[in-house]
Image (cartoon, rainbow, N blue to C red):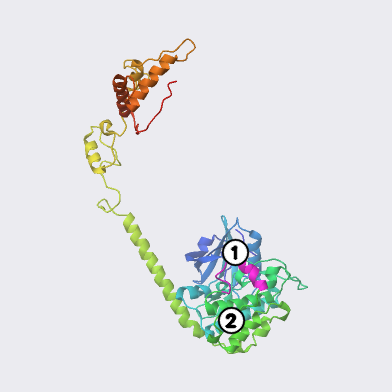
Amino acid sequence: MFTTLCELKKLSEESLTRQPEEVFDIICKLGEGSYGSVYKALHKESGQVLAIKQVPVDTDLQEIIKEISIMQQCDSPYVVKYYGSYFKNTDLWIVMEYCGAGSVSDIMRLRKKTLSEDEIATILIDTLKGLEYLHRRRKIHRDIKAGNILLNTEGHAKLADFGVAGQLTDTMAKRNTVIGTPFWMAPEVIQEIGYDCVADIWSLGITALEMAEGKPPYGDIHPMRAIFMIPTKPPPSFREPDQWSPEFIDFVSQCLVKNPEERATAEYLLTHEFIGNAKHPSILSTMIAEAREIRESQAFRNAQQNSNNAKTFGAGDGYNDATMKQRDAGTLVPNRDGTATAELVADLGTMVINEPDLATMKRHDTDPMDTNRPKYRPLFLEHFDKKQLGPTANGTLTADDRGAEAVSVGAGIGGGGAGAGGAGAEAGALQRALLEEGNFEFYESKIDFDLV
C-alpha cells in the first residue's frame, strides 16, 4: 500500500490503509487522461462521488509523481482537488475531485455545437482565476485547452490534467522543454527559447478560439506542420470576426501576442471588459443538462445493444438462424456405420467427405511397403517401352537412329513425312496416354526438325 504525503480532506488515514476496493465502488469509465484512465467512483463511507485515475506503473512514474505533487500543493476552488493515492497491484490509483459535467471539449462534442460568447466568458473567468492561482505559486500548467477545463454540475470551471505541469525555480528561471499539445503551444515553447507563466495565456487565447469555432487554429493540418507555422505566421484570430463583439476579439488578441514580454498576464486579463461582463455560472445549466441527456441516451443505447448481442450469442438449442448449420451428430463427424456420410454430402454440396470415386484427383495404390501389388507405372511410359532407342557404346545415338526418331516424332506431331501412318498412330497413342495421366494440353504448332 502506498499513500502520498498530503493533507487529507475527505479520506481518512484508516481508509488509505485498506484495499481501494474496500473503500470505493467503481461506477463507470469516464475517459482517458494523461498517463491513465479515469473512472467515476463512489466513496462507500461518505457516499461522495469521486474520480479515480488508474495509472499503470510501467508508464513514466516521474511524470505521475509530478502530477500528484502539483495537485497536492493546490487548494483552490478553480483547480481539481486531490484526495490521496493507492498503490494496487500494477496500478497507481489517484483519487481526485469529480466534475460531473465533464470537460468543455466533451460538451461541445456531445451537443455538436460551439459555445456562445456569454458561455465562453463565464468559463474563462474561472479558468483565469485558476491560472492566477497557479502562476502566483510559480506553477505553469503547460496544457491549457478545452479538454482540460472541467465543469461541475453547477457550472464552475476547474483546471485539470496536470500531467505536463511544471514548477519554476525560486528565481523564476524560464523553462526550455517542449511539452503540451501542439495546436495550443505558444511560439516561445515551440522555439525552445525559454518561457514562463504567460505561455499558458497564449494557450488560453487558442482555447477561446476553440470554444468559439469548434477547433483551434491550424486544427485541420498535421501537427508537425502546425509546429512550424505557429512561430512564423502572424497571431491567429477569428475566421468570421463579424460574429463576435469587439471586447471578445480584443481579449483574444491580448492573449495571442507573439512576444511573451508584451503578453497580458492572468491577473491583468481578469480586469478586462470582456471578463468583467461575464454572467453567473447558472447560464451554463442548459448546456450541461443537454450534454447529460445525450450522454445518458448514448449509454442506454449501448447497454441495449450489448443486451441484444448477448441474446443473439446466448440463444438456445432451437436457434436456427446462425450462419453454420446446427447438427445433432456433432461437428462434421459421421457415424462409424457410414449412415451419416451420404446425408452430410448432400447437405454440404461442394464439400466431399472421403469419397474416392468422387475425388478430383485419381488415386493409385503406390504403397512401397505393399510387395503383393505390382509397382505403379504411368501409361505413357509404355510408349517408350515399345520404341527403344539404339545407343552406341558411348551412350549417343547414331545418325540413322536420330533420323528415324526425328521422322517418328515429326510424323506424330505434324502428321506428315516418311512413316507418317505408323508413327502417327504411335504418337496419337502417346498423346492419349498423356491426357489420361495428367492435365496436359496440346497446342497446334509448326515444328521444323533439322534432319541433316
Q: Could you tell me residue 445's position as x and y percent?
A: 37, 33
Q: Quadrant of the C terminus?
A: top left
SS for tag 1? strand
Q: Amino acid at mark 2?
A: Leu
Report if residue 230 lies within the magenta region: yes
Q: Which mark is residue 60?
A: none
Mark 2, residue position: 124
Q: Could you tell me residue 212's position as x and y percent?
A: 54, 80
* Stretch of the chain drawn in magenta: 216-232
Q: Mark 2 to mark 1: distance in Å?
A: 30 Å
Q: Residue at x 59, y 66 (%)?
A: 223
Q: Nearer the viewer, mark 2 or mark 1?
A: 2
**Residue 225 appears in the rendering:** yes
For the residue carrying disc 1, how many other residues have a C-alpha within 10 Å: few (<14), some (14-19), or many (20+)? Answer: many
Q: Which mark is residue 85?
A: 1
For the residue carrying disc 2, how many other residues have a C-alpha within 10 Å: few (<14), some (14-19), or many (20+)? Answer: many
SS for tag 2? helix
Quarter where residue 142 is shown = bottom right
